[in-house]
């Protein structure tokens, strides 16, 4: 984690914050069309159509919710399936940790967004020793296998670690306590997780290193500047959707005949 600067802006084409809304807006119109193509293909041919899954991980205040609002909010909400993963329910705890993940995977034509994910099962679970090491240590290979299978089945995975600094997290937590309109975002438990920062960084490092596969690579997104973070995830989504190069689906009716029918109706 020490190699990544949370305040960096790699790949950003503008001069700084002042260009961010223009650049993100421009991305938005491109994303809108790309997402519509994905959706149209999902409708026309659910079996063959690709799916996209954005996995968001990061410490509290890193901006997982902000990404959903500002990056995913650029496309038609009908095409986005958001799932937030909390501590597992009693029902979920009866199953393998990937059970609830499999149940939440995006269907054809959809962009799935995971706010936290199966990675919690090697992050908070590791830091808090919620299962023995003998168990969590086998999960990295299992996750790689699971993700490889997903990708082979036609899902494009975009894994983002939102990298916020220890100092910036403090400022954001303090800001939540300085304004009554932000109290709802504050969770006293966040300070407990913060007190274990080095252990979390170690756990993140392990997940980033062991699960950075060719099929499903990790992206470490500098997250101290919100405008950069939002732009960067939107740009990754744009690249992934562009890469899919989806044509508009062919009509499954005779266009000429239908034009005549409408004209005559
Ligand atoms: P938030 O995303 O801020 O609403 O918080 C959700 C909480 O659920 C965080 O404290 C996570 O650490 C916790 N959580 C998510 N997944 C798991 C999991 N598999 N095991 C234990 N805790 C989890
Ligand atoms: Mg939180």
Image (cartoon, rainbow, N blue to C red):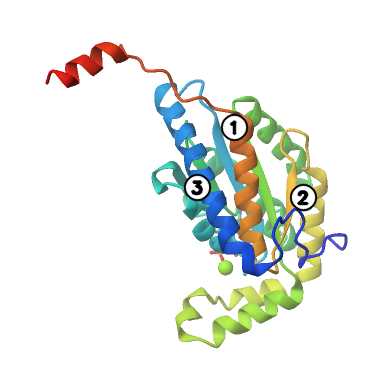
> What residue lies at 83% left-to-right and 47% top-to-bottom?
209
Where is residue 174, by image quadrant?
Answer: bottom right
The crowding category of the residue bearing disc 2, from other C-alpha atoms within 10 Å (few below 14, some 14 to 19, many at least 20), is: some
3 and 2 marks in contact (CB < 8 Å): no
The span from disc 3 to disc 1 (Cα, nearest Å) is 23 Å
Instruction: Give the residue pinned by disc 3.
Output: 29
Q: Classify 82 as above or below 239.
A: below
Where is residue 252, by image quadrant?
Answer: top left
Task: First in sequence, mark 3 or 1: give its number.
Answer: 3
Relative image position of residue 50 (x, y in whole percent): 54, 29
Where is residue 142, by image quadrant?
Answer: top right
Mark identifier at residue 207: 2
Q: Classify 40 as above or below 77.
A: above
In this view, the residue in front, 34 or 263, is: 263
Give the quarter of the figure containing the C terminus: top left
> What residue lies at 60% left-to-right and 51% top-to-bottom?
234
Instruction: Give the residue pinned by disc 1.
Output: 155
Give the quarter of the figure containing the N terminus: bottom right
The span from disc 3 to disc 2 (Cα, nearest Å) is 34 Å
1 and 2 marks in contact (CB < 8 Å): no
In this view, the residue in front, 162 or 129, is: 162
Can residue 94 be seen at all in this image of the molecule? no
Relative image position of residue 136 (x, y in whole percent): 74, 48
Q: Nearer the viewer, mark 3 or mark 2?
A: 3
């Amino acid at each position: 984690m020490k190699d990544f600067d949370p305040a960096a802006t790699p790949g950003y084409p503008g001069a700084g914050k002042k260009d961010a809304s223009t650049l993100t807006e421009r991305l938005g119109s491109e994303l809108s069309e790309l997402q519509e193509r994905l959706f149209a293909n999902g409708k026309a041919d659910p079996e063959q159509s690709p799916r996209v899954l954005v996995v968001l991980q990061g410490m509290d205040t890193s901006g997982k919710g902000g990404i959903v609002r500002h990056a995913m909010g650029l496309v038609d909400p009908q095409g986005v399936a958001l799932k937030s993963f909390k501590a597992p329910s009693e029902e979920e705890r009866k199953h393998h940790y990937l059970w609830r993940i499999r149940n939440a995977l995006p269907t054809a034509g959809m962009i799935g967004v995971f706010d936290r994910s199966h990675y919690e099962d090697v992050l908070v679970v590791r830091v808090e020793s919620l299962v023995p090491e003998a168990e969590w240590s086998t999960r990295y290979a299992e996750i790689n296998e699971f993700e490889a299978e997903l990708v082979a089945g036609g899902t494009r995975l975009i894994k983002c670690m939102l990298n916020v600094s220890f100092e910036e997290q403090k400022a954001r937590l303090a800001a939540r306590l300085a304004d009554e309109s932000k109290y709802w975002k504050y969770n006293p438990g966040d300070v407990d997780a913060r007190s274990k920062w080095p252990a979390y960084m170690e756990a993140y490092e392990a997940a980033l290193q062991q699960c950075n596969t060719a099929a499903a690579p990790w992206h470490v997104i500098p997250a101290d500047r919100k405008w950069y973070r939002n732009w960067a995830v939107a740009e990754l989504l744009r690249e992934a959707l562009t890469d899919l190069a989806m044509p508009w689906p062919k009509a499954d009716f005779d266009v000429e005949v239908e034009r005549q029918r409408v004209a005559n109706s």
